[in-house]
Amino acid sequence: MHGFKRWIVAALLFLSMRGVAVADEHPVTVNAAEAAVAQAQAAVKRAADQRALWTSAEDALRKARRALQEGNTAMAVELARFAQKQSELGIAQKGYPLFR
């Protein structure tokens, strides 16, 4: 059962990072990057308010903001999407049964 959980986590990470190849095909505007970071920031706040914030979401949001400041809009969008997904997964995890 423990190995199954690892595969699930690996699959979720793979699916959330799938957009990396697509991000390089089309240039990302600053407005789109700012919107993605704002959405991620709202998702992180929701997760924090529910005490379900994963550190990976917080770190990704911090890196997305830094990438946006440095002008790397594609990286900012990629990291913002990852932060948003991690926040959503943290909130969803609250519905799981507790360990016994």
Image (spheres, rainbow, N blue to C red):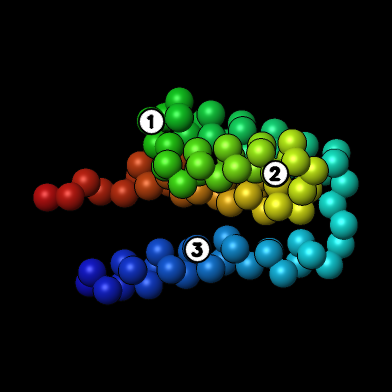
Give how far apart the Cα atoms at labels 3 and 2 are.
21 Å
Q: In the rendered image, is residue 19 in sight?
A: yes
Q: Are marks 1 and 3 in contact (CB under 8 Å)?
A: no
- Regarding mark 1 in the picture, which secondary structure is present there? loop
Residue 51 image label: 1
Q: Earlier in the sequence, mark 1 or mark 3?
A: 3
Horizontal side of residue 33 vs 56, given as left or right: right
Q: Quadrant of the N terminus?
A: bottom left
In front here: 68 or 20?
68
Q: Position of residue 63 (x, y in %)?
A: 60, 43
In the rendered image of this protein, does residue 16 appear above or below residue 92? below
Say which residue label 3 marks. Answer: 13
Q: Earlier in the sequence, mark 2 or mark 1?
A: 1
* Residue at the spot 77% in from the left edge and 48% down from the top edge: 72
Q: Are marks 2 and 1 in contact (CB under 8 Å)?
A: no
In front here: 94 or 72?
72
